[in-house]
Amino acid sequence: MMDTDAALADLLDRDAIRRCVVRLARGEDRRNPDLIRGCWWPEAKFDYGVYNGDFDAYLAWVVPGADAIKDTQHLLGQTHIELEGALARAETHVFSYHRVDAGHGDRDTCIGGRYLDTMAKRDGEWRIIDRVMLYDWEQDWGAAADWSQGVMGYPFTAEHFPGRAKGDFSEGFFKGEAR
């Protein structure tokens, strides 16, 4: 039976790993190099099947990102974590939405897959040391909706509602800025 201190340490490690993966998805969706950098160890490697390399290659690939990919949103599912001291293996399910202009107008696509992350804990902090992306499915949802008209026939009442298409209102929200 695990003692209370060991159980608490295990719980805190698992939470820190999950928060790292969440921060990374947030950083990728905002193409924020500081958020992204804080989730990877500098010598980390990645392999997304369509592109791979070291952390510097990854960061240059994600920020500023392809001009054709106008918006992304990563929705994370369950994370299975196996801890081994200062190393961990984590599998996180992901749905990633992308608004893409491939030269024929904007299209909405979605990919379902899993991140396989090897995590390392250094000085009390968990970060990714290696990531492999597995693809389970992809779906082209067709022509993108025209958000200039609002949603479902209803016009927006303010400029900030269409998400990152008009900046990112949530950045000010988390800074405590009033509407």
Image (tube, rainbow, N blue to C red):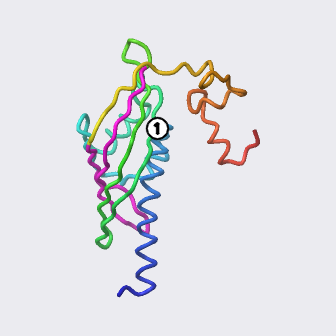
Q: Quadrant of residue 95?
A: top left
Question: Is residue 32 found inside the magenta-colored segment of the image?
Answer: no
For the point 38% across and 33% down, which residue is it? 110
Q: Quadrant of the C terminus?
A: top right
Residue 120 x/y as whole percent: 33, 63
Q: Which region shows up in magenta?
A: 107-134
Q: Residue at x 48, y 43 (%)?
A: 27
Mark 1, secondary structure of its residue: strand
Numbered label tally: 1
Please give the name of the residue rendered at 42% of the width and 34% of the height, measured from the top-left corner. Answer: 97
Q: Which residue is more in the foreground, 149 or 47?
A: 149
Q: Main secondary structure of the magenta part?
A: strand
* Amino acid type, mark 1: Gln
Residue 90 in the image: above or below residue 67: below
**Residue 168 falls in image quadrant:** top right
Q: Seen in the image, is 37 located left or right of residue 82?
A: right
Residue placed at 43% from the left, 59% from the top? 18
Is 133 included in the stretch rendered in magenta?
yes
Dot 1 corresponds to which residue?
73
Does 15 sit above or below residue 30?
below
Give the residue at the far right of this rendering.
178
In the image, residue 90 lies at what x, y percent? Answer: 32, 59
Is 153 left or right of 75, judged from the image as shown? right
The x, y position of residue 58, in whole percent, is 33, 40
**Within-10-Å neighbours for mark 1: few <14, some 14–19, many 20+:** some
